[in-house]
Every structure is written in C-alpha cells, then in structure tokens.
Image (tube, rainbow, N blue to C red):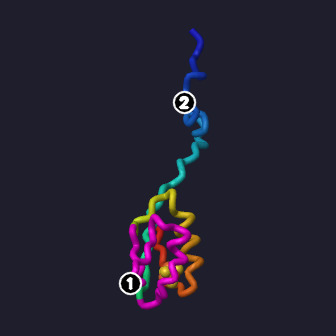
Amino acid sequence: MARQWFNRPAHAERKGGSCGSSVAPPMIRGMRVTVDAALCEANALCEQLAPEVFHVDEDDELHILQAEVPPELADRVREAVRACPKTALSLAED
Ligand code: SF4
C-alpha cells in the first residue's frame, strides 16, 4: 500500500518533516499601551489612527479603551504612538 503523504495538512509540510529543520510558528506577543496624562494635549491624533483603542472625551481627556492591544490593531497603535506630538504614549511589548 502506498504512503498517503498527500493527505498531510499544509502546515505539516512547512515544518520540514523529519530532517530537523522545523520552523517555529511566529510568536504572538503581548502589547500594552499607556498614556502619560500630564503630557497628553488631547488633540485626538491617536484616536484618528486607532479609534478602537483611543478615545478623547468631551472634557478633553484621553481614555485607553483597550490597554492590552489585540494583534490585529498592533500596527495602527504603533503608528499612533509614533504620531503623538507630545510623546505621551508608551508601548510595552513582551
Ligand atoms: S496623540 Fe498624544 S497628545 Fe494627542 S490625544 Fe493621543 S496621546 Fe494625547
């Protein structure tokens, strides 16, 4: 009976089989964003870039809606941190 190697899932082929050259899956890292309220001038630039994470209320106070940034928002949050003219945002990544 022939081996049914063709029924292996696609990810099994990418791991390199038994030759010892397996590639580890990419790590999903945690990202946490914080604001220094003393620096923030509430211009809402960060909210424009990532409204799922940042919100400036009617009293000009910035709220971090998701301090633990989901992976799908990571790039936009990094962009918001870079764009902040007051360098009020900080990121901590595991
Ligand atoms: S971009 Fe910076 S200064 Fe502007 S609201 Fe966001 S944290 Fe505050």
- Secondary structure of residue under mark 1: loop
User: What residue is shown with label 1?
Assistant: 59
Query: Please, what is the dominant secondary structure of the magenta stretch?
Result: loop
How far across and down, in percent of the image, does residue 66 sit? Answer: 40, 66
Image point (45%, 68%), residue name: 53
Q: Is residue 52 magenta?
A: yes
Query: Closer to the camera, 57 or 15?
Result: 57
Residue 7: image x %, image y %? 56, 22
**Residue closest to the far bottom:** 38
Q: Name which residue lies at 40% across and 73% down.
A: 64
Q: Along the polypeptide, which appears first: circle 1 or circle 2?
A: 2
**Which amino acid type is marked by label 2?**
Pro
Asked whether 60 falls inside the magenta stretch, the response is: yes
**Image height of 72 relative to 68, above or below:** above
Q: 51 or 22, which is in the foreground?
A: 51
Query: How many angstroms separate mark 1 from mark 2 (CA)?
Result: 54 Å
Question: What amino acid is at disc 1?
Answer: Asp
Q: Can you name the residue that lies furthest to the top here? A: 1
Q: Tag 2's secondary structure?
A: loop
The answer to whether one can see residue 38 in this image is: yes
In the figure, is residue 6 to the left or right of 38? Answer: right
- Residue 94 seen in the current view: no
Q: How many marks?
A: 2
Q: Are marks 1 and 2 in contact (CB under 8 Å)?
A: no
Judging by the rendered image, the residue that carries numbered circle 2 is 9
For label 1, being within 8 Å of ligand 1 is answered no
**Few, some or many residues within 10 Å of mark 2 (<14, 14–19, 20+):** few
13 up-or-down from 92: above or below: above
Residues shaded magenta:
38-65
The picture places residue 43, in percent across and down from the top left corner, at 52, 83
Would residue 4 be found to the left or right of residue 61 on screen? right
